[in-house]
Amino acid sequence: MRPQYFLSALALAGCASAETHEQGVGVVDSGTGGTEDSGSGSGVPQDAPTSGGPDSGPGPCTVTTRDLLMNGTFEGAGTGWTAVPIVANDPLVGDNSGGGIAAHSPTMRAWLGGVAQANATDRLYQDVMVPASTTMLVLTGFYEVRTGESGATVYDTGKAEITTTAGTSIEVIKALDNAQKTTTWTSLDHPFTNLAQMKGQTVRVHLTTTNDGLNATSFYFDTLHLNATVCE
Ligand SMILES: [Ca+2]
Ligand SMILES: [Ca+2]
């Protein structure tokens, strides 16, 4: 009897202790969870969710996109841009009151070329600093090519590209010529692939054109944006 009583007492005790243990585990669990939560929470409360930025790369950061170009719509006339025209004092930026086509974003646009003269070059450029933390860089905008030439032979050319400030090409955005004339504003959407050569550097957004001595070709640009996605 005594052993049975003892066993049943043990069983009861075991039951009781088991329940206690379960509760204990529960308490330990919530305690551990609480400790971990409050631990990382007390570290940097706002960073804990951001460090869910294994998605966004090493270390917490804030992802933003900003336009690196000044006056990409040319509404500020030539502000922010340097013009090197074949015709002296031609700003290469303006409205269509002096000829040419109407702007994409009213009322001004860049107009290069349009001069039938051997080796007539126009250049319009702007230097921009590409943040070292840039993860994506995209140029968007619009262009038009209007020409007095006909046929598929290339006589007059234009180019939008990123160069060094010394003029060495880093990446061509769009190569244009008289054989690829347009009849309406045509969109540009160029994600750069040579980003490694641009990050942390001052680079040049470069529009250049060349005409020969016959049948002028005009190259127009407007509503340009150089959007950098940065993580910082
Ligand atoms: Ca414009
Ligand atoms: Ca020509």
Image: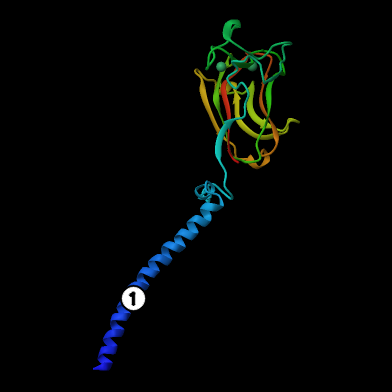
Q: How many marks?
A: 1
Which residue is more in the foreground, 173 or 83? 83
- Quarter containing ligand 1? top right
The amino acid beneath tag 1 is: Ala
Check disc 1 and report the residue beneath it: 18
- Specify how the rendered protein is coloured: rainbow
In this view, 84 is above or below 64:
above
Say which residue appears at 60% left-offset and 17% top-offset.
74
- Quadrant of res 109: top right
Say which residue appears at 45% left-offset and 60% top-offset.
33
Q: Residues within 10 Å of mark 1 (few under 14, many from 20)?
A: few
Q: Tell which residue pokes out farthest to the right in this image.
A: 166
- Quadrant of res 97: top right
Q: Is mark 1 within 8 Å of ligand 1?
A: no
Residue 167 image position (x, y, % from top left): 73, 30
In this view, 91 is above or below 135:
above
Residue 143 image position (x, y, % from top left): 56, 22
Residue 8 image position (x, y, % from top left): 26, 85
Which residue is more in the foreground, 183 or 28? 28
Say which residue appears at 72% left-offset and 15% top-offset.
86
In this view, 195 is above or below 166:
below
Q: Tell which residue pokes out farthest to the top in this image.
A: 97
**Quadrant in the picture for the C terminus:** top right
Which residue is more in the foreground, 86 or 92? 92
Asked which secondary structure carries label 1, the reply is helix
Left or right of 143? Residue 165 is: right
**Quadrant in the picture for the N terminus:** bottom left
Which residue is more in the foreground, 52 or 173? 52
Residue 62 image position (x, y, % from top left): 56, 41
